[in-house]
Image: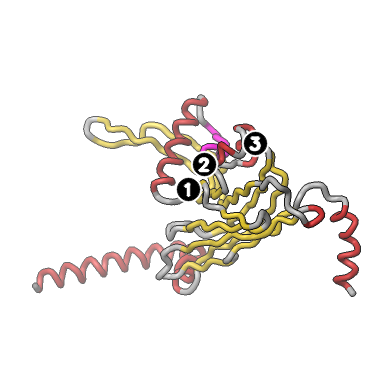
């Protein structure tokens, strides 16, 4: 009875709907990091629900974005002075995602214009990092490009054009690799339905990445008892160094 009542309430909205709806999901919403964690491949999939239940003759496109956690970051630029590398300049950004990956059914520049890409942050170069103390736009862009380059090379930022497969115009799927170096926190999986250069539907799912087992215990100990954790870490390092030295002298 409850389900029938809910459908009755939604029926007028569905009948009057002009734009399609997205029904997304992900293969894992809770990813646990343990000692043997080497990364995970997320499957993002779902359906496009068109008004009247019939897909249009011309197929729309899909872009999926996985990103997070968003946090402030300070970047430092190193320069070689008298043969020594030193920090020469720095810039602070208010909201840089630690991980960002986008997969699309076609290259993004074929789907949306620059304005739409900037609004929805579609593409690595369109991330809105919000510089906090850059003196000039040139400086902000220089540091932003440096951050993007470092994270692209480490697998934390990625673009996958053509990686979204759409079947029969209504079912879609894509795979995005989450590397082992990602930090814990809340991530989002956003799905965008794009047609004629416009985003006509969007949906989001949350993903939690957290430490489990011994890794979780160590992380919690470091957070809750930082001083004791620091002393034990130093003592362990000294003990291992002494043991290694004694073993070396013996052989």
Q: Is residue 118 above or below residue 136?
A: below
What is the x, y in percent for residue 177?
48, 57
| Residue designated by label 1 | 158
Q: Residue at the spot x=57%, y=43% of the render? A: 95
What is the x, y in percent for residue 86?
31, 36
Q: In this view of the protein, which residue sits in the foreground, 50 or 73?
A: 50
Pick whichever of labels 2 and 1 is earlier in the sequence: 2
Quadrant of the frame with the C terminus:
bottom left
Q: Tags 2 and 1 in contact by the CB under 8 Å rule?
A: yes
| Residue designated by label 2 | 124
Cα distance between the residues tagged 1 and 3 = 19 Å
Q: Tags 3 and 2 in contact by the CB under 8 Å rule?
A: no
Q: Which residues are magenta?
A: 124-133
Mark on residue 67?
none
Residue 36, quarter of picture: bottom left
Colour scheme in use: secondary structure
Q: In this view of the protein, which residue sits in the foreground, 62 or 5?
A: 62
Pick whichever of labels 1 and 3 is earlier in the sequence: 3
| Residue designated by label 3 | 116
* Other-residue count near label 2 (Cα within 10 Å), few / some / many at <14 / 14–19 / ≥20: some
Q: Residue at the spot x=66%, y=46% of the render? A: 60
Tag nearer the camera, 3 or 2? 3
């Amino acid at each position: 009875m409850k389900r029938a009542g809910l459908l009755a309430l939604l029926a007028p909205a569905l009948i009057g709907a002009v734009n399609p709806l997205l029904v997304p999901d992900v293969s894992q919403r809770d990813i646990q990091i343990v000692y043997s964690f080497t990364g995970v491949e997320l499957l993002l999939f779902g359906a496009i629900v068109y008004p009247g239940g019939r897909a249009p003759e011309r197929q729309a496109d899909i872009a999926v974005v996985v990103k997070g956690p968003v946090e402030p970051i300070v970047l430092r630029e190193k320069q070689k002075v008298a043969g020594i590398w030193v920090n020469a300049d720095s810039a602070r950004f208010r909201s840089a995602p630690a991980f960002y990956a986008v997969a699309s059914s076609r290259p993004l520049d074929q789907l949306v214009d620059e304005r739409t890409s900037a609004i929805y942050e579609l593409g690595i170069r369109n991330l809105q990092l919000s510089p906090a103390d850059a003196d000039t736009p040139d400086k902000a862009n220089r540091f932003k490009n440096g951050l993007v380059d470092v994270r692209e090379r480490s697998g934390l930022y990625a673009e996958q054009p053509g990686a979204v497969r759409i079947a029969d115009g209504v079912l879609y799927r894509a795979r995005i690799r989450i590397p082992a170096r990602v930090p814990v926190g809340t991530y989002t999986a956003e799905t965008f339905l794009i047609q004629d250069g416009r985003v006509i539907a969007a949906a989001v799912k949350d993903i939690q990445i957290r430490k489990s087992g011994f890794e979780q215990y160590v992380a919690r100990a470091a957070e809750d008892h930082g001083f004791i954790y620091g002393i034990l870490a130093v003592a362990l390092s000294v003990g291992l160094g002494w043991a290694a030295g004694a073993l070396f002298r013996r052989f």
